[in-house]
Structures are given as C-alpha cells and as structure tokens.
Amino acid sequence: MKKPCLTCLCLSTAMLIPAMQAIADRLPVPEGKVLLRVSGEIDRTNVDDQAHFDHAMLDHLPRQTLHTSTVVTDGINRFEGFLMSDLLEWVGAEGDTAAALALNDYLIEIPMQDFSDYDVLVADTMDGQRLTARDKGPLWIVYPRDEHPELQDIRYDYRWVWQLHHLEIQ
Ligand SMILES: Nc1nc2c(c(=O)[nH]1)N[C@H]1C(S)=C(S)[C@@H](COP(=O)(O)O)O[C@H]1N2
Ligand SMILES: [Mo]
C-alpha cells in the first residue's frame, strides 16, 4: 500500500486543531460589544439561554476567505469572516431553520441545509475593510454564488442578510 504523504497529514491536522479547539472550548462570556446573538435550539449558552458573541469571540473561529460577486456591489469582492457551519457547530445548533434578523428589522428564515451544502460565510470584512453598520456590517451572510450557479437566484439573494445581529435556531 502507498504510504500517506506525511506533509499532507501534518498540514490537514494543523488546520483542524484551531477549529477543534474553538469547538471544544466552553463559551466564554463576551466582554466587548455584543455583535451576534444565537438563540433557540442550541447546546452552549453564556447569557441566559442564548449564546452572545463579541468580536474577540468570533475571532476564535477559523478565518475563511471567499471571492465572489454580489447583487449589490460591482465586480468581484474579497470577503473574510467565518463559516456559518463552524459557528453553528460551536453553539451546538440542531434545527431545520435559522431565522436571521438584521438591525433594520429585516427577517428571513434560512434552511439549515444551506450551511451543510455550501460554505456560507458570515463576513466581517470586504476588500480588506471591516464592514460597518452603515455599510452592510458588522456581519453579512455571504453565499459562494460564483462557484454554484444554482445560488444565482432570487431565493438565495433574500438570504444574504446584511447587518445580521441575531440567529434563532428552530
Ligand atoms: N439587513 C437586510 N438584509 C437584506 C435585505 C434587507 O432589507 N435588510 N434585503 C434582502 C433582499 S430582498 C435582497 S434581494 C438582497 C439584496 O438587497 P438590496 O438590493 O436591497 O441591497 O439583500 C437581502 N438582505
Ligand atoms: Mo430582494
């Protein structure tokens, strides 16, 4: 049998460790401004029956980069943030839908299946600039729409929630 490539093994292990640590950790209590609240069907909580996150806590999640066009910007943008699936795993979310609520009271129900089917990003940075509440921030749900033609559809455009601040798992 062919020996597994040692470099590949080490690389994949090194990449997994931060993700596993973040997930194994107990949820700390946020010290800074709370950017995101997760409620509903979750296993890990830190404030009453919800999981609250400040920037420092969200930075514990493995960072991801996604290049994609959007329906509201020109050209291709570079987004950075964390995967929705990593966040949901960290809080132990189990459900069929995530109701996503934005600062402008926009509300949409997103099938949880999206987050296992696609690397959906929760972006805090676009083209190297932190997103602000004035400009689609502080958190924006970004789908890899350029990689998957089926995502180039109005049903998914609705789910690109900007100014995201609350997820309710149902
Ligand atoms: N916070 C927030 N996110 C939102 C919306 C909104 O009104 N508020 N509109 C949604 C809809 S209907 C679409 S099609 C896309 C693009 O919306 P826009 O063209 O109005 O920016 O963002 C989605 N995300
Ligand atoms: Mo829309």
Image (tube, rainbow, N blue to C red):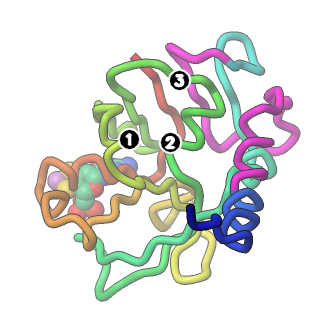
Q: In the drawing, what numbered circle is on residue 116?
A: 1
- In the rendered image, which quarter is residue 9 located in? bottom right
Place of residue 135 in the rendered image (x, y in percent of width and height, measured from the top left):
48, 67
- Looking at this rendering, what residue extends furthest in the front direction? 1
Q: Residues within 10 Å of mark 2 (few under 14, many from 20)?
A: many
Is 85 on the left or on the right of 155, as rendered?
right
Asked if 132 appears above or below 19 in the picture, the reply is: below
Residue 131 visible (yes or no)? no
Residue placed under numbered mark 2 in the picture? 85
Work out whether mark 2 precedes mark 1 in sequence or the reverse, and give the earlier one.
2
Q: CA distance from mark 2 to mark 1?
A: 7 Å
Secondary structure state at the residue bearing disc 3:
loop
Q: Please give the range of residues in magenta.
A: 16-43
Give the residue type at disc 2.
Answer: Ser
Q: Residue at x 65, y 19 (%)?
A: 50
Label number found at residue 81: none
Tell me where residue 170 appears, x and y as whole percent: 39, 16
